[in-house]
Image (tube, rainbow, N blue to C red):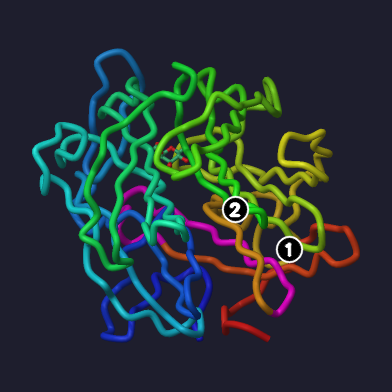
Amino acid sequence: MHTNKTLWKDVQGNPIQAHGGGLLHVDGVWYWYGEDKSGPTRRYERPDGDPIVRVDVVGVGGYRSTDLVNWEPMGVVLKAKEAAYYDLCPTQVMERPKVIFHKASGTFVMWLHIDRPDYKLAGAGVAISDKPEGPFTYMGSIRPQGRDSRDQTVFVDDDGAAYHICSTDMNATTLVTRLSGDYRSLSAESKSLFIDRYMEAHAITKSHGKYWYIASGCTGWDPNPARSAVADSIWGPWEELGNPCRGGDQPEMTWSTQSTFMQALPDDRVLVMFDRWKREALGESAYVWVAADVSAGKFELSWQDVWSGFK
Ligand code: GAL
């Protein structure tokens, strides 16, 4: 059992470094991948923008579990500097890694937000491995349809089709792009959604026949009211449902958190994962996981003091 709004520990008693992360379920094992932000937090003066608080890139932390509570560390599965790629240098930005499994080839495919410290590259990076524990091999980064990509996630539908979802047009628009058949690149099939709604921290899942979506507004590490939406197709039309958080401390500010991932659970609920960013020490940012019952077609998240796994 883990207390929400704390920095959870792995089974060895060390803080879990998997911020901005997501889950993957393969052959009865759950994998949690996210940003290892264990280095010192420092201020970066952007030449033509507001200063930003950052941690040099360590890599992507990986954990595994069979109950979504006890997490065994797999180590840093994609390390900064491991390959001779500028994108992976500690001084750059690597955020919101998500891993999906390509069954036909047995490949674990990781998508990440790749950026420069001024956030002007705005690319989508890809890394692959034939084992969940890595090491992942970095393949490079692209821009979907030549457009900027920030705060990305990936989602695999029931039919095996996979999608890349990101903020584009300087965060004004949400862009959905279908991945290629091998999940390693982007197809030409894409659509702009939530135009001029300025959303980030996108997460999508499918449950009870509908697509459920959560995101934040754009206030950097600071919290803001979450947005949610429901649709019958990933391409929309999406019906916005507002901030789904109820109860607890400051639900109107998403309990001082920002969304990162949604997962339909075997117990029929939808798990929503949040980061509670601690901007003065980003590596101490806490986790908040809550599960919702969407069977009645509503999306409401009731505060839970603890995350204790499946029902
Ligand atoms: C947030 C974003 C985070 C990180 C941060 C940097 O808006 O969701 O992933 O990029 O800004 O300030």
Quadrant of image for the C terminus = bottom right
Tell me where residue 121 appears, x and y as whole percent: 32, 22
Amino acid type at circle 1 is: Leu
Mark 2 secondary-structure assignment = loop
Q: Residues within 10 Å of mark 2 (few under 14, many from 20)?
A: few
Amino acid type at circle 2 is: Gly
Q: Give the Cα distance between marks 2 and 1.
A: 28 Å
Which label sits on residue 160?
A: 2
Mark 1 secondary-structure assignment = strand
Residue drawn at 52 percent across, 52 percent down = 260
Instruction: Confirm if mark 2 falls within 8 A of ligand 1.
Output: no
Tell me where residue 232 appears, x and y as whole percent: 82, 45
Q: Front-most of 295 and 57?
A: 295
Tell me where residue 19 appears, x and y as whole percent: 39, 57
Q: Say which residue label 1 marks.
A: 301
Q: Front-most of 257 and 268?
A: 268
Residue drawn at 18 percent across, 53 percent down = 79
